[in-house]
Amino acid sequence: MRSGPANQQFGARQKQRPSKGTARGYAVLYCTCALLLFCNIAMGLALYLAPEINALFKQDNSALLAAYEQRIVQLRLEVDRLHSRQYAQMGDLNLQMHELVQQQEVLAEQHEYVRALSQMAREMGIAMGQSGDSDHSTDLVTGRLTPLPEIKNAPDLARALITMQEETRQALVALSDAATLSTNEIVSGLQTVGLAPDLAAKTGIGGPFVPPRSNNELSIIDEANAVAQALSQFQSAQEALAAAPIRRPVPSHITVSSNFGNRTDPFLKRTAFHAGIDFRAPSGTPIRAAAAGEVVFAGNNGGYGKMVDIDHGNGIVTRYAHLNAIAVHVGQKVAARQQLGLSGSTGRSTGPHLHFEVRRNDNAIDPSRFLAAGRALTQFL
């Protein structure tokens, strides 16, 4: 019974002890691993310490470093180029702004010039309402041009300048059209009484040679020249209008008592030719010149009584008869509507009135035609 357990314990110890073959296998494995590790280390050291291999590693590093350095240089050059372009663009913008500001000053002067021309045209009596079909063109002619705001941005300023330049051009066109239309109206009105004003006297051509300009500049210059010519022609028409006897010699409320042509003579009671128009002017009514001219007669003239004759040129003479007093003398230059004397009833007259005649080359013509032309051209008188 005792030997059994002892034998079992001894057998268990024999199973736990390794055999000699197994221990030898482990030793061989460990030695092999150590040998392989040593060989790898030795080979690595040999490769690292070999001159060719070392030189190869150093050469690769140098090439890599050189490539990086070259790339860095290229990047620096690119940055410098971008900076230079930025500075150049800033310089161009400054130059553009400077040029635009100069253009703004020129256009502002042009605006003021157009306003001055518009004011001059209005003072000369040009019919502004006929300058165009739209209210905008009328505004331009009367001087209500759009002011240019303060703009710091170059593109916006350039667009504003273009608009301003176009407004200036339109204003000049409208002003030229208004002057031309007014001139044509005066000429047409004077032609109805046989007067043809000479408008070519002030339209001579000349001047120094100037190199050609750009299209925009040429357009502005052409329009300005057109305005100057139109105003010059209008001035000639006004001068002809001033010398045309188309104004009433008496106030507008005074009526006509006898017309031009055949009538019954108030003294002989038979048909006779009446060479003028009689106005019911009470004694002492101021009598004024129907147009500018020169006094060629001032005194008594038979049945005309106290009389004044004014020469207006082109063979046209106006006569003012039956005056009570004369306020001018022969050789005197008189302006349109200047007082010549006072109405009365001197000479062959039945009562206070003014006898008014218009004579061309000493032939009496109907004064009512001239007075009708004056009524049609009232806005220019």
Image (cartoon, rainbow, N blue to C red):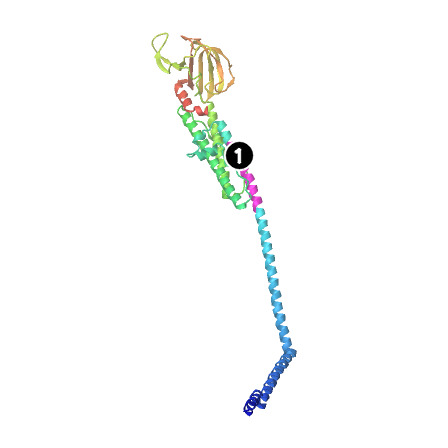
- Judge left or right: residue 369 versus residue 155: left
Front-most of residues 11 and 328: 11
Q: Amino acid at mark 1?
A: Tyr
Magenta-tinted stretch: 96-117
Quarter of the image where the N terminus is located: bottom right
Task: Indicate yes or no whether the magenta region holds residue 108.
Answer: yes
Return the x and y of residue 188 as percentages of the image width and height. 41, 27
- Judge left or right: residue 70 versus residue 342: right
* Rendered view: 95 above or below 180: below
Front-most of residues 302 and 100: 100
Q: Which residue is mark 1?
A: 113
Instruction: Report if residue 175 is visible in the image.
Output: no
Identified at 51% across, 30% down, the residue is: 119
* Rendered view: 166 above or below 270: below
Q: In this view, which residue lies farthest toward the front?
A: 1
Identified at 60% across, 64% down, the residue is: 71
Front-most of residues 303 and 226: 226
- Judge left or right: residue 302 versus residue 74: left
Q: Tell me if mark 1 has few (under 14), some (14-19) or many (20+) residues whose alpha carbon lies within 10 angstroms of its own.
A: some
Return the x and y of residue 10 as percentages of the image width and height. 57, 90
Dominant secondary-structure state across the stretch colored magenta: helix
